[in-house]
Amino acid sequence: MIASPWRFGALFSALLLLSACVTINVYFPTVAAERAADRIIDDVWGPEAQQRSNPPEEEGEPQSQRLERQDQPMAMRVLNRVVPTAHAQADLEVETPRIRELTSRMRDRHSDLRAHYESGAIGLTNDGLLSIRDQSAIPLADRNRVRNLVEQDNNDRRALYREIAEANNRPDWEGDIRRTFTERWQSRLPDGWYYQDSRGNWRQK
Amino acid sequence: MTAVARLTCTLLLCLTGFVLAGPALAIDRVSLSIGDIEGEGWHAEGLDLRLPLRGGEAEVRVKRVQLPGDTQLTDLRLRCGDLGLTPTTLRCDGATLSTTLPWLGKVEGAGELTMKLDGSRVEGQWQLTTDVGTAEFAVKSDDGGWTVDVAELTITEPGALLADWLPADHGVEGWLALEGRLRADDGRTRAWLEWQSELTAHDAEGRLASEALALDGRLLALRHGAGPWALRTSLRSDRGQVYAEPIFLDLDDHPLHLTAGADWHPETGQLDVRQFNLNQQGQGELSGQALLTGLELQTARVRLRNGRAGGLYSVYAHPWLVGSNLDQLTLQGRLDGALEWRDGAPHAARLQAHGVQLDDADQRFALRDFNGLVNWAAADAEAPADSRVQWREARLMQLPLGEARLGFSARGRDVRLQPRQVLPILGGGLRVNQLQVAEIGTDDLDILFEADILPIDLGELTRELGWPPLSGILSGNLPEMTYRDGHLNLGGTLIAQVFDGLLRVDDLSLEDPFGPAPVFRADLRMRSWDLDHFTQVLQVGRIEGLVHADVLGLHMIGWEPVAFDARAWSPERTRERRRISQRAVEDIAQIGGSTPADWVSRQFLRVFDAFRYRRLGMSCRLEQGICHMDGVAPANGGYYLIEGRSIPRINVIGFAREVSWPALRQQIHQALQQDDGPVVQ
């Protein structure tokens, strides 16, 4: 075995390479975000929100994470078994004064907006906001007020997604939080209200 | 009908009908079938004529007539009940007409026509009925000119009539009744029209819409040759509703009347409004001149007279202010003003207020007897005259402001207050050395404020603000306060005399002051406060002595503290009397999280009214919702909150090192709420 020093060198190099690849991945905690979204939706919409259809109580791995793992090289997967990837699935922080204030304003505004959801005048967009979909369903005298309510609610919604990301010290999660909220708003939308599908077409729940 | 008509293709002349009259064979009527006929700009297909030779019934049928401008008549049938033909005249009595027009649908008509064959005179009257309405009109033409009189034109389906012209998803319903005359003679064209209408209309997005809007009017028009049209119009609307985003107008409440004189140049599309006058009930009177090209306003001079501040705010200003701090105002008073518009943009404006009273539903601000003249000019215009305003009384966030007169200049998006003007506040005030507001109405709003605080009585001030009453005098200066990028910062130090001591505020900043949860930061330092005054104000028992305190790194979100490092302590080497009442001992013990639980302690406390103390103090460092507590000195595994002196001697010792902030806040709140002294359990 004259090649053994080489083999040792190769093995050492491989280990070095592997160890160089060890990174701590903090994945977006989808399940926790869904729970946080549900809590806020309960608060804003109250009892009229659809019951949580798929309560994500168990701490399963989010799908995105599973997919990501299958894409990893075998060596990384072996290594991850030995040294589990660090990821946090604790609850997201949504109890800051600013988030409470935003949620409370959205709840107050919702009592004004409810009739317009029901008439089909407004609906949920596919990016977690509100939009006027049928002005003609709003009496002329109310149009400007509803337009402003929608605009204010959208400002608060944008601020809410940003605040949740910042309250958890992950400003880069804002997009994921907004996507999670979009999905939760839509799945908990009361019957008869409108939402936009992924292509931007309006659909009635 | 022009004689240039050229027969093309097949001129198929068929004598298709013979009528036998009497024993002799005589031709009484001629039927002609003419395939196609074409003239300059028009074209007809399938033309059939049935003509009497000696008077009687005549009929023309055409399958299709193509007129200039893409207008097409189909199935045209023109019938004369009695056609009279002499060598010079043609007379058609008992005429009927039917055809189909693309934008009118089926058209049926009845009337009569007389004309000289040389074309020198034409006279006719017709009643037409179509799918979209009815019309009754008369035409007269002679050597002097021609006249069209519309006695009654009623349109009941305006949407169908305008279908070809309206953009997609626009709609119009309602009715229009019109009468008028169009006359041309001696090189002049004159017209008058009078109409009543009620329209419900909307654009595709619903941003422009009306609901049963009554619009009645009159138009006089005169044109010499090919010159401009001179127009005079009067429009009146007193019913219905209009929405032109964001403005909603209920004409039942605010009927309006517009009169205007204008020149219209058809070749350039320019409308020169020489004078207009718009009067709206409950709003005021607007008059002036304007020049428009198409719908674009080029120049204008507009004057507002007798403007009602309340009406103008609720109808025209409020829609733009919804969601802002100015959306719940009630206004009274009168406004006059003027606006000059040049090159498609505002150039200069003047607004004069007379006896304006302003109130906010949330009581954030109020003005009493506000008068003044504001002159404004665009940034690239000549500098405007100075503006002056005054009020008898004002209120800003519960802060009462006395009678004041202020001078300032307003140009472009910038406003500058003239230096060293005083805003009186409760016997003192603010002497404003500098106030510059730039980029108003943009995201780059920039405010610079510098003022001296003329001594203000703190007791009065805190009472007005509804705060716990403080005593002392607030004075000092606000060296450089800025608002930039949504942040309010105090550039220097604010010093106030409070409770016979000093309050110093450093590094004050406020982020997003008008947002849902403003972020406030500051360092506060209190020196030599007289505790006797302080505790009397707070009604927490009585403490005599002095105290120093620091609240450093104070960080509040939505006016709720999230972090600070606070410490209060008795100063060293001062010789003032230091005594603490039994109740104050209880309160401090409660705030410190301890109560004298044993019987001996309770009785001991009850025997004496007050105790002497050597020093007292407390500290709390708030982090992550936890208050890390300490006292003035270590004591038996805890810390002294009050260290007693002489006999009867009392020490209050705290042991809790980490206390939940909400719990501590609750304890402070309870201590401050107890009116009848503490309940010792």
Image: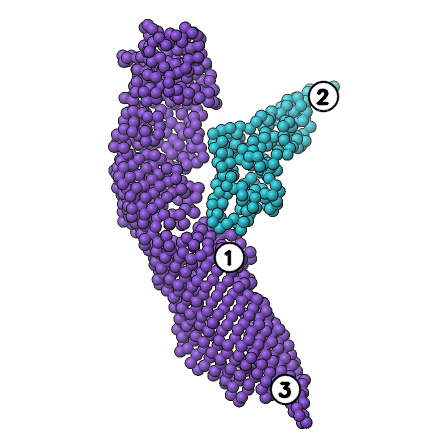
In this orientation, which residue lies closer to the viewer: A161 or A148? Answer: A148
Q: Quadrant of residue B653?
A: top left
Q: Which residue is mark 3?
A: B29
Single out the residue that lies furthest toward the front: B676
Q: How is the image coloured?
A: by chain
Q: Secondary structure at mark 3?
A: strand
Say if B109 sits above or below B670 in the image. Answer: below
Q: Image check: B58 left or right of B664?
A: right
Check disc 2 and give the amino acid type: Ala
Check disc 3 and give the amino acid type: Arg
Q: Image check: B433 left or right of A161?
A: left
Quarter of the picture containing the C terminus of chain B is top left
Single out the residue that lies furthest toward the bottom: B24
Q: Which chain is purple?
A: B
Q: Quadrant of residue B439?
A: top left
Q: Which residue is mark 2?
A: A3
Q: Image check: B550 left or right of A40?
A: left
Q: Gap in Å between the C-alphas at discs 3 and 2?
A: 125 Å
Q: State the mark number for residue B201.
A: 1
